[in-house]
Image: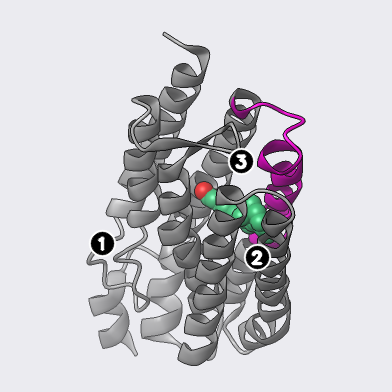
Amino acid sequence: MEPITIVYVVGTLGMLVGIPPALSLVGDEVGIDFDYLWAIPGIAALMYLLMAFDIGSVQFQGYHVPIPRYIDWALTTPLLVGYTAYVAGASRSATVGIALADFLMIAFGAGAVATGPPTQWVFYGLSSLCHIGILVGLYGPVRRSALNEPPSHRRLARLLLNYIGFLWLAYPLVWVFGPGLQWVDAAGIAVIITYLDVTAKVPFVYFIYRARKNFVQVQEAVPDDDLSETGASESGPAVAVTAT
Ligand code: RET
């Protein structure tokens, strides 16, 4: 088995870890809808499996590029930023706008990887502008709307926001030394990206899973008060509503 195959198998297994906690939130009456959270590790697991079998990879400028990686990013990174904005209580338009900017970032990134210099750097610049737009959106309107949320929501929103804000900075950097300048070969890049992808997705799902009880109390019971520290978390939404 080639080393790169092992890397992608490990990536697949890593993503699988995120699926059960996300699935457990489907249909939960938690006042906030996490029904599609499973798609983040789910789509990634599938795409990593394809990469493990080297399905859908192409050579661009003599560089090995797995197309499933870009399909994964195009579908799941809008979900990551979209859910972050949603948890922060951002408006629908802000949430959709930031998810759209994210999709464009990946689309331009695909353009960058498919072309050679100098065009690739134009696409790289456009993609980076979208990335900056996402960061401005997250640290501007999204963070501001989180301030109006109950403390437990606000804490989770801030965690997700900073997690995305910092971790994602690695991607454009890695790209420069990989497909961009080709100083690091595709196998080396595969290791780094797999590590980053699993780190970007699985803990993200877990942070939400870990905070799930807060949503029941805050949404259903006392909207303006933080009861997350009272420990009355086992009652569930129906009881909480009757108690109101
Ligand atoms: C590219 C290259 C062009 C410039 C920029 C990029 C940014 C990519 C990002 C990807 C994030 C991926 C994640 C995957 C999770 O599994 C396309 C690399 C700005 C930010 C979080």
Q: Position of residue 167 (x, y in %)?
A: 69, 51
Q: Residues within 10 Å of mark 3 (few under 14, many from 20)?
A: some
Mark 1 and mark 3 in contact (Cβ < 8 Å)? no
* SS under mark 3: helix
Q: Quadrant of the C terminus?
A: bottom left
Q: Residues within 10 Å of mark 2 (few under 14, many from 20)?
A: many
**Where, by quadrant of the figure, is residue 109 drawn?**
bottom right
The answer to whether residue 101 shows anywhere in this view is yes
- Tell me, for residue 26, which label it has, or none: 1
In the picture, measured across the screen, residue 154 lies left or right of residue 72, that is right
Q: Quadrant of the N terminus?
A: top left
Residue 125 in the image: above or below residue 176: below
Tell me the kind of residue under disc 3: Leu
**Where, by quadrant of the figure, is residue 134 drawn?**
bottom right
User: Going by the picture, which residue comes out furthest to the top?
Assistant: 1
Q: Is residue 174 magenta?
A: yes
Residue wearing tag 2? 127
Instruction: Give the residues drawn in magenta, as a range.
Output: 163-186
Q: Is residue 183 or residue 30 the one in the foreground?
A: 183
- Tell me, for residue 196, which label it has, or none: 3
Residue 101 in the image: above or below residue 107: below
Q: Is mark 2 within 8 Å of ligand 1?
A: yes
Whole-Å distance between the Cαs marked 3 and 1? Answer: 26 Å
- Tell me, for residue 60, which label it has, or none: none
